[in-house]
Image (cartoon, helix red, strand yellow):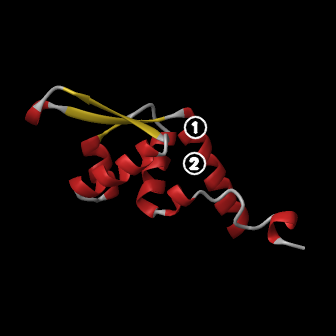
Amino acid sequence: MTPAATGSALDGLDPILNAPKRLAIMAVLEGSQFAEFGFLRDHLAVSDSDLSKQAATLEAAGYLTIRKSGRGRGGVTSYQATAGGTAAYRRHRDALRAMLG
């Protein structure tokens, strides 16, 4: 029997969320309405450019939305998980739990 026919321990894992930083971003967003750039950067202990790159990948996948308000130094960037992103995160989390449990 092929792994697809029997179901694989890897079923449900999302390649977008296999990256630890993207998984961590979604874990924070899953439990909150939104998160600001500075909070996520400090909470995850990543650089500005790394957070921007990881968030852009999640946005391109449709997993989060990025909102920018204001301009320059007074501007605020915030992130919010989409319904599809939250569902993908939960599937991925559940698959990890099943695989490790």
Above or below for 64 versus 22: above
The x, y position of residue 13, in whole percent, is 63, 59
Asked where in the image residue 101 lies, by quadrant, the reply is bottom right
Element assignment for label 1: helix
Asked if residue 23 lies left or right of residue 2, the reply is left
Residue on which disc 1 sits: 84
Which amino acid does the dot numbered 1 rest on? Gly
User: Residue under circle 2?
Assistant: 89
Residue at the image position 87 percent from the left and 64 percent from the top = 5
Query: Residue at the top extreme?
Result: 70
Amino acid found under the numbered disc labelled 2: Tyr
Query: Tag 1 or tag 2, which sits nearer the N-term?
Result: 1
Measuring 60% from the left and 46% from the top, which residue is drawn there? 88
Q: Residue furthest right?
A: 1
Circle number at residue 92: none
Q: Residue at x 31, y 53 (%)?
A: 53
